[in-house]
Amino acid sequence: MDLPTSPATQDGAASDTNTIQPEPIDPAQWGRPMTLDDFAPPPVAPVVVGRPLSLNDFAPSPQQTVGRPLTLDDFAPHHLPPISPPIATIPPTATENIPPFDNSSLIVDETPVPPDTRSNVFGEDVVLSNLNTEFVGNQETQLDAAESSTASFIASSTNRCVDSAVVMHHRSVRALANRTVAATRPDMIKNAKRLAMSQRLGAGKPFIHTTMQDISELGTGIHLYFMFTKYMGVCFCVMSVLALPALVMNASGHGFEIDMVDPLKFSTLSIANLGVNSTMNATTDWCIDNPFTDDPNYISYITTSFDVLFSLAFVGFIMIFKMKIQTAVAQQAENVTPAKYAVFVRGLPRSATEADIVAHFNALYDPLKDYMELPLYFGCWGKRKPPIERRHLTTGGHLSKPVTNLDHVGGNDLYKGKWIAEVSISRPSGGLLRTFLAMDDLTAEAAELQDILDTYKGQQVAEKVTPRIEKKLKKVQLHLEKKTNRLKALKKDDGGVYLTQCDSAFVVFNCVESQRRCVRDYRTSHKWYARYFQPKALRFQGIHRLQIQPAPEPSDIIWENLEVSTQERRYRRAFTNFIAFLLLLLSCAIISVAQSAQQTFSKQGIPNFCAEAIPAVFLGDYDNISHYEWVLGWDPYPTEQLCPNIEAFHVTFMNSPRVTQAIPPGSNLTQCMDPCVSLDPSIDHECNTLPCFRPDLVNKYTRPCATYAASDILQCYCGPKLTNAIKLYGIFEGPRKMYQNQVPCQEYLTSYVRKNGAIVVAAGIVIIVNLCLQTIIRAFGEFERHTSESERASALVFKLFFAQLLNTGVIVLLVNANWTDVPLPLSLEKIFHGEFDDFVQKWYVAVGVGIATTMLVNSVAPQIAPTMMTFVIGPISRWFGQRSAITQKQLDEVYAGPPFDISLRYPLVLNTVFVTMMYCGGIPILLPIAAASCLITYSCDKVTLMRLYSIRTAYDEVRPPPMFLPSPPN
C-alpha cells in the first residue's frame, strides 16, 4: 500500500538524452562538504523547469537500480565523487562467471511527462504526482517479482557458492566493477569513520559548539525532547534556589536523633527534622528573642511561602514550554506535506471500488460549494449550518480547478474533473508483505556474503575462509527458499482473493480545504456511539459507517499493519495491558519485599534508646539525665572479677552512675546494669526500660515500657565511634579502621552495612524492575500492530512512563501505608502491610529516604550504559571489528552507531519530573537532585548523539519506504 507523498505529477527519472547534466566539479574541490544544491537536478533540465520539485527528481533511475539493494551512491550527483568511500578493488574475473541476466521484463518507461501546474484554494502550487506505481494495485505483481527474483537466485546456485549470487547482486557487481577505486585498508577505515561522523549530530563539531539549532535539524520531536530536558533542568535549578530557605531551616532543626539519621543526611533535609527531639535537653538559655522562637508558626509561614513560589515557577515553565511547542508546531505546519491533503478511511465494505470512493468524497467536498458544517451535538446529531469563523485559518488566495491532467493516475478518466487527486486502496495482505520484507533482508545478507567471497578471491587465505562463508551462504539460501515457498503458499491459500478486496483507503484531495472539511465532518467518527448514529449523508453509500482521521506522513506509516482492524488492535492492546498489569503486580511484590527488608534493618526499636532510655535505667529517673555526661567506655583488659566470661566486653558509662530508685518487690522484670556484655545468645538476656518498673512515668513522660537485649548497649558505644571515624577517615576507610580496632563494634558495623545496603539495594531493585519492564513493554509494541511509528512510540512512552512512575513513587507509598481499616484480598494483605497512617516523622526515615536515594541513583544509573558504550565498549568493539571486517560495507557497519530511540529516554525525564513534584514539598532536596538528573540526561544524550548514535530514524532502519521497492515486471 502506498500513499503519494504529495499531490504532484510523477515525472519519473529523465533519460540521459533529455537531462542536461551539470558541469563536472574540479576534483580539487571534492574535499568540501556537500550541500543540498549538489543533489538538485540541473535548473535548466526540461523536466523540472516551471514546477516544484518532487522526490522522484532525486531518485535514481529504475533501470540502474532494479533488482538490487539501494546504496547512497545511487543518490549521489554524477558530477561528484561517490558518497560512499572507495572499496577494495574487485578483480576483473569477479564478473566473468556471472551469467547474463535478462532484464527486459523490468524495463520501465521513463519518458518525461509534461507537468500540470495550478494553485489550490490557499494559493499553494499543487502538482499532481504519483511518485511510484500504486502499491495496492500492484501488490500481486510485486510479490510475483519477489518470487521470480528469489527463484532465479536459488536456481543459479552451482557447486561453488561463489557463483551463486542473487540476481540483484549480479547487477550491483557490474556497477561496482565500473566504479571501484583501489584503496588501502587505512583509507577504508578512514572513509568509514568519516561516513559515520557525517551521520551523527554536529558531524564532528565540538560539544560546546553544537547548539540547539543543530539539534533542531534532527526533527521536531527530538528538538522538543532536548528543549524539555534542558529547560526542565534550568527550571528545577530555579526551584532549588527558591526552596533554599526551607532546606536551610530543615537542616538547622534537631527533629531526629543521631541514630535515626541516614548516612546521606537526607532525613535531616526533610520537613520532619524541624523542631527538637527529646534528647536535646534544651533549657531557657537556648532561647533567643526573635520571630523564629516567639511564634512557632513563623517557620511554617516561610516554608509555605517559598513552596508556593517554586510551585508558581513550575507552572510558569509549563506555560512557556507550551508556547514553545505551539511555535514549533506552527513552523512545521508551514511546510507543505502529503498528509495535509490526505485522509485515512476505515469502515469501507470489502467490495468497495475506486470509483465508489471517488464518487462519495467528490460529492461531499467540492471546495467551490458553500460549506455547511455539521454541528454533531453529542457527537452525532444536528443539521448542517454555516461554519463558525475560525481566525487561525488562512484567508485569501484563489480557488484551484478540478483535476484535468491524468498522468499521475495513468490516464484514468475516473479523476477527470474531480476534486479527488487519487485514491489508494489498502488490501488485506499484511502477511504477504511481512514475508516479502523478510525475503528482502535475506537477499541483502546473501549479497553481503557474496561481496566477502569476491574480496577473498585470489588471496592466500581464501582456502581457509571461503568454506565457512560458503556454508553460511548456503544456509541463507535455504532460509530464502523457505520464505519463497511460504510466500507461494500464502498466495495459494486465497491470497489472490485478498489482493482484490478493500480493507481501507487513503484519499488524496486536490486542495487542503477539501481535506479540512472532511476531517471536520468526521471529527467524532473515532467514537463508537457517534459512529453508530452517524448521519446518513456521511455514510458510504448511505449504509456503511466510516471512520476517518488525518493521514500520517508516508514515511511514518507501518504499511504491513494497515489491514489490522481497530477491534483486533484493541484486543491486542487489552492483552498487552493485562500482561503489563501482572508485571506491575509482580514488581510491586518485589519492591515490597525489598522495602520490608530495608525497614527490618533500619527499624527503630525504642525511641531515644541511647540518649535517654539507657541512662534512665542507670540513673533511675528522667529528670537528672542532663546533669551528667553520658559517655560509654570499653575496657579491653578487664579483670576476671569484673568479667568472668572471657568472651564478654566490659562496657560501662564513664561517669559511673548509680541507681537511686529501688526495684518494686516481687517483680519479674530485669534492670540490666552489668557492665559485662556478651553477644553470645546463650548469655545475652532480656532487659526492661525504666517505665516498666514505674508505670507512672508512661503517662508523665509518654515513654513506653519496652524490652531490649543487654547487648544492645553496644549500639550506644559504637554509634559515636563510627561517626567520629567517618569524620576522620571517610565513609569507606573509617568503618574499616574501626572494624580492626574496635572489636566490640564488629557486629554493629555488620548490621550498619546491612541497614544502609538495604536502602541502596531497595533503590537498585526499583531501577532493575524498571529496566525489565522497559524491555518487555518495548517488545509489546510490535505485537500491538500500530499503524504508524509515531503511534507506536507514543504508546511505548506512555506505558514506560506509567510503569516507572508506579514503581518509583507510588508503590513505595502504598506498600508502607497502613491498610488495616481497608478490606483487602488476602493476597494483597501480604504486600500492603505498612504501618504509617500519615506522613509522620518516621515515614521520612523509612520511606522518604528511600525515595530520595532512588531518585539520586536514577539520575546516574540510566546514563551508565550509553556512556560506557560511547567511551569504553564502543572503541573496543570497533578495534576488534575493523580487524575482522572484509568489505567497505562491513567497516561502515562497524563504525555506524545504533539509531537514537527517543521513546526510551522520554519516560526517564517524565518520571523524574512527576516523582519530584509529588514529594518535593516535604523533601525539598529532590529539587536539586531533579535538576542534576535533567541536566545530566541532556548532556549525556547530546554527547551520545554526537559520538555514538546515528541520526537515522527507526523507521528507516526497519524497512525502506515502499517507493524503493523493486518495480514489478511488465
Image (spheres, grey):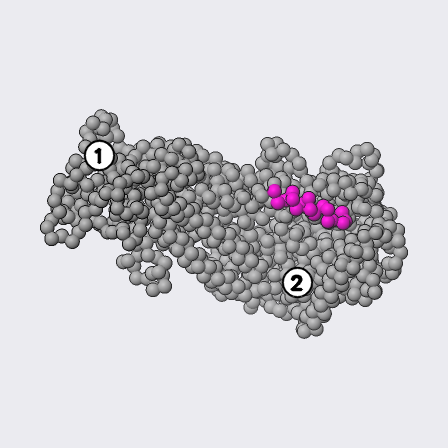
Q: Check the image and report above or below for 244 versus 461.
A: above
Q: Position of residue 639 (x, y in %)?
A: 26, 40
Q: Quadrant of the C terminus?
A: bottom right
Q: Position of residue 501 (x, y in %)?
A: 65, 68
Residue at which label 1 appears = 655
Q: Is residue 306 magenta?
A: no
SS under mark 2? helix
Image quadrant of residue 549?
Answer: bottom right
Question: Looking at the picture, which amino acid does disc 2 mark?
Answer: Arg
The reply, left or right, for residue 568 in relation to residue 430 is left
Q: Main secondary structure of the magenta part?
A: helix
Q: At 31% across and 47% down in the image, what residue appears?
A: 647
Magenta range = 872-890
The label number, if any, that marks residue 434 in the structure image: 2
| Between 961 and 542, the one nearer to me in the picture | 961
Q: How many other residues sit within 10 Å of disc 2, few (<14), some (14-19) or many (≥20)?
A: some
Q: Position of residue 429 (x, y in %)?
A: 65, 66
- Residue extending furthest left? 665
